Amino acid sequence: MNINLTLIGQMIFFALFVMFCMRFVWPPIINAMKARAEKIADGLEAADRASKDLELAKEKAVSQLHEAKEQAASIIDAANKRANQIVDEAKDQAREEGERLKAAAQAEIEQEMNRAKEQLRGQVAALAIAGAEKVLEASIDENAHKELVEKLAAGL
Amino acid sequence: MAGDTLTVKGYIQHHLTNLTYGKLPAGYERVDYETGEQIVLTEDTWTFAHGGEEAAAMGFNAVHVDSLAWSFGLGLVFCWLFRRVAVKASSGVPAGMVNFFEIIVEFVDQNVKDIFHGRNPLVAPMALTVFVWVFLMNLMDLVPVDVVPELMLLLGVPYQKIVPSTDPNITLGMAVGVFFLMLYYNIKVKGFGFVKELTLTPFKHPVFIPLNLFMEVVGFLAKPFSLGLRLFGNMYAGEMIFILIAALFSGGIGWMLAAGLMQIGWAIFHILVITLQAFIFMVLTIVYLSQAHEDH
């Protein structure tokens, strides 16, 4: 139980080991641990951010889908309207065309009728003249009486 | 000693004697170890002590070779173990033993952070050194008491105490080291405030300066002594009980069985004690240094 130089020796060893630990042991270990803790924290943060991004992306996708649907609906609406319009226009055109055709037909009919009348008139005149010729035979000057007969025919 | 008839007293004394190398004063009478003759030293002689009496005669000029060698060796073990980890340590995934040592480092770091609030790069490494080194020194207590001394006897070494922390020189050596650091930081951090602390607390009046000074200085000096002696006392007592139980082995087959069980029981209990004492030594070291940094 003697106190002796051992005490001094132990103090020297103590100082040596503490200095060794302070220089070569503690800093590398604690720095590595700190760096790792930071790395893990960064990783967790990145994961958080990624999941938030994912959520945002999902929301965006949903809203885009919604928008697209709306757009599609509006496009279909417009197309329907346009189709109706086209049908209406076609109907109008058809009606107009019909009317035009009818008018043309009527005009033709009238023309035809007139021509027939004219023809008939001419034939009637010729017939009358022939009749009159027959009745009057050569006593009648064809040229002198032609005007007269034509007047008669026009009165038909 | 090898030549003595083995008595319980001799056995215990043998286990409690350090291998001492020191200076015997001129005129000292000793028995020559080999020839058995009585000789008187004509001049101061540096030599190994044969027994406690000679070691005592050497006084302060002696070295406990076994304590210092084991202490130094265990310190090297600490440095080697942790240096290996320090080299391997990276911010990547830790593997194997690195995990275990990082747990120790983290434990020490947490304790330092909880207790010590100043900024000092010395405190944490010192706490780690103290904790692991003292633990390793205490751990030698779990080696069966006879193994190493008997091996050493075969090698011709008369004494061998393998638990450095049962040597007050070792524990007080560390405590005095801590004490010097306390003095240094008290003066460095507080400057004149340290003098004020010693003279004007707890009674803040000039009249009480002598009383304050006396009480504070005693209190200040008591810290390293309680630190060193607490560890020494616990480990010495533990070692003593191991030796006493070991002495029971001479009492016949019944005693041998009982003593075997007792050794195991005490060893298991002692695992707690050695860890706890290492922890206490570390925590008190941090606390004392923390007090040295706290300016009121």
Image (cartoon, coloured by chain):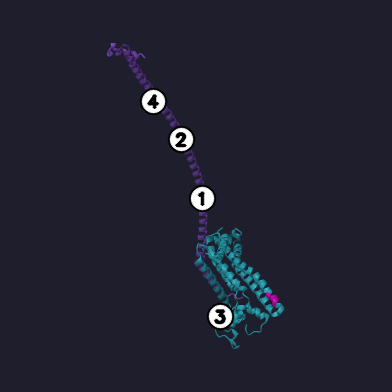
Chain colours: A purple, B cyan
Chain holding disc 2: A
Disc 1 with disc 2 on a shared chain: yes
Distance from the alpha carbon under mark 1 to that under mark 4:
72 Å
Q: The residue under label 2 is which amino acid type?
A: Ala
Distance from the alpha carbon under mark 1 to that under mark 3:
81 Å
Dot placed on the residue nearer the N-terminal end, 1 or 2: 1
Disc 3 with disc 4 on a shared chain: no
Q: Are marks 3 and 2 in contact (CB under 8 Å)?
A: no
Distance from the alpha carbon under mark 2 to that under mark 4:
31 Å
Q: In this view of the protein, can residue A29 be seen by the observer?
A: yes
Mark in front: 1 vs 4: 4
Q: What span is in magenta? A: B256-260
Question: If the image is split into quadrants, where does the N terminus of chain A sit?
Answer: bottom right
Look at mark 4 in the image and give the residue it sits on: A104
Look at mark 2 in the image and give the residue it sits on: A83
- In the figure, B26 relative to A81: above or below? below
Chain holding disc 1: A
Mark in front: 3 vs 2: 2
Which x, y percent locates residue B172?
58, 71
Q: Relative to B43, is A83 on the left or the right?
A: left
Q: Nearer the viewer, residue B104 or B35?
A: B104
Residue under the point 40% across and 27% down: A101
Mark in front: 1 vs 2: 2
Disc assigned to residue A102? none
Distance from the alpha carbon under mark 3 to that under mark 4:
152 Å
Q: Nearer the viewer, residue B71 or B170?
A: B71
Mark in front: 2 vs 4: 4
